[in-house]
Image: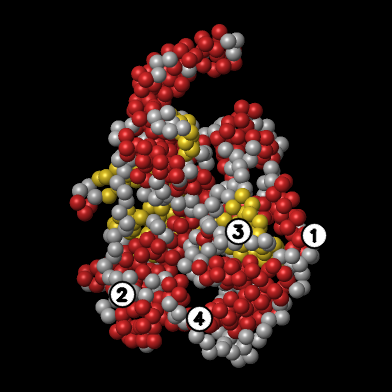
Amino acid sequence: MDIGIWLRGLGLQQYELAFRDNAIDAESLPDLTEGDLEKLGVLLGHRKRILRALEDLRAAAPPAPSPAAPVRAEAERRQLTVMFCDLAGSTALSARLDPEDYREVITAYHRAVADVVRSFDGLVAKYMGDGVLVYFGYPQAHEDDAERAVRAGLACIDAVGRLDVKSVKLQARIGIATGLVVVGDLIGEGSAQEQSVVGETPNLAARLQALAESETVVIAAGTRRLLGDLFEYRDLGGVEVKGIAAPVPAWQVLRPSAVASRFEALRGAALTPLVGREEEIDLLVRRWARAKAGDGQVVLISGEPGIGKSRITAELEGRLRAELHIRLRYFCSPYCRDSALYPFIDQLWHAAEFGHSDPPTAKLEKLEALLSRAAPRDEDVPLLADLMSLAVSERHLLPNLSPQRKKERTLEALSRQLEGLARQQPVLMVFEDAHWIDPTSRELLDLTIERIRTLPVLLIVTFRPEFQPSWTGQSQVTMLTLNRLDRRDRSALVAQIVGGKALPDEVVDQIADRTDGVPLFIEELTKSVLESGVPLVGIPTTLHDSLMARLDRLASVRLVAQIGAAIGRQFPYALLRAVSDLPEDELRMALARLVASELVFQRGTPPDAVYTFKHALVQDAAHGSLLRSSRQQLHAQIAQALETHSPELMENQPELLAQHYAEAGFVEKSAACWRKAGGRSVARSAMAEAAAQY
């Protein structure tokens, strides 16, 4: 296909040179995003026209296979979100249409669903006539697999509804469930080969799909628990599901919610009291005082997921509630990294209080009223209205500008909005999750950081360690890295969460040990203990996807992580070498990758090196992903290696061998080791330990 001919067919031949200069050919054309088109200088209206044409182009191509899953050595246990999509009314449709026409309809439907699933990094596991089975969380887990599944479900409903095949109106319906499964066994041969999933979850997703009305997404309780207020729902109550005795709670997902902050949507309005961040809050308060005096300040807050970046900004906002100031909040999204200026568009949308059902004229009036607070220039209103995809009124005509010049003027208009507000009151500007920022927003953030030097503005930017800010070293910029809580603060946070309820000291100690000072881990594990009534029943479902995502990013060295996890929180190189079948050079390379990823820390050098999992819960996730049979076999190998290479442990640490033999299912050997450990404890008058061991 010739790009020039294709563009001329759309009446957009003026962009042919830009496409050719950037090596856009027939192969790369279907992969273009709106962000790519903006970078090429394509006007907004023309971008929309090209994107619609690209949808048709993709529809004409054969369905691309889902990315091949790396073949696991064997099946594994993991939390999975399963989506089952069905074409409503397909039986009647197949009776009405010629078989060839019906085949064309089904092919278009499959292609539309596959394209959406691929865009959310899901895996189409199987096409079953008019049904499509999809996995989110395998072979690659993400911290937000449940959210990805629901967003994909809503997008599938929309994509299938927009299909125009044989003049037939198509409608999909979708069921989604999340739960523990065994996944990865290869069944079948040739093109029929697939990786099976065993467990209640896929069956529940299929049953909910069968109950769903046309063009609706229905989710189970396990999925709902992970979504918080990210979406708007209709509670369907308990529904009767074939094969399950008791009614199953279910919800229909209506649309994404209007809550801008992911932190607030997932954590809820009632925040856990802040613990152990007094020094950090004091620093922010001091920077706020300087900003109010006209010495603009920037604080960059870095930290791993769950460490409390959003929580500390919420605490500052709460403390400033009684002061006169203007609060501006911007949120980057993992789903909008290619959408130019998304955080700023989203902020204007919420600040102007747009409603989903508002007509364009009402939205324009709301936007004009919002912008008037900063006394904008005449040209700012049409530029920002165009940014919001609103048609401007005759009072505000959009100037005739080149794409590059219009972009520059739009950035200037947004900067003037900030300056205008800062002239009225001090501004607290919070920019969350910069690791997901789009390139144009980063460009505007660069300009903002420079401009606020002489404005009463405190800008707080939060991000994860992988984001590399270019603003450090400037006089108005302060870097703040959040560290993990110490043991005293961990116990204090557990006490805050349990409130009036009492947990045994040993349970509090175990929570403190296993959560490694990450506030989110502490909160979720404590809640899990309170809800279950059983101490430390496993990894909370709310953390499972996030922990597995860290391991899946290193799929090629997962086996080494699993062996290490079976050995313990700490595992020596010599023991790992004795248990692993890998050649020594491969083993060392795998360990180097684990260390580089910061999943484990290394002390010393092989063969005397000792490795430690950064988080006990990551160790639990790696260990828990093993099938029971594999886990037993691995622990048996570890126990035998310990007896062979470290026979002194039978005298010095018999309880270590006892634990591995117990995990291996060697009851008699385990009992003998525990008996020996109990005898050692009695000899030391450690009677409580002896009682537990006996």
**Residue 472 circle label:** 3
Residue placed most toward the observer, 109 or 125: 125
- Name the residue at 74% across, 50% down: 282
At label 2, the amino acid type is Asp
Image check: 231 left or right of 288? Answer: left
Q: How crowded is mark 3: few (under 14 residues within 10 Å), some or many (20 or more)?
A: some
Sequence-first disc among 3 and 1: 1
At label 4, the amino acid type is Gln
**Residue 404 circle label:** 4
Residue 330 x/y as whole percent? 61, 64
Residue placed most toward the observer, 387 or 614: 614
| Cα distance between the residues tagged 1 and 2 | 58 Å
As drawn, which residue projects farthest toward the bottom?
Answer: 394
**Residue 25 circle label:** 2
Q: Answer yes or no: do the residues labelled 4 and 2 have beta carbons within 8 Å?
A: no
Sequence-first disc among 3 and 4: 4
Q: Is mark 4 on a helix, strand or loop?
A: helix
Q: Answer yes or no: do the residues labelled 1 and 2 have beta carbons within 8 Å?
A: no
Position of 567 relative to 672 (above/below): below
Q: Residues within 10 Å of mark 1 (few under 14, many from 20)?
A: few
Image check: 105 left or right of 606? Answer: left
Residue 233 x/y as whole percent? 54, 59
- Name the residue at 45% across, 79% down: 41
Q: Answer yes or no: do the residues labelled 3 and 2 have beta carbons within 8 Å?
A: no
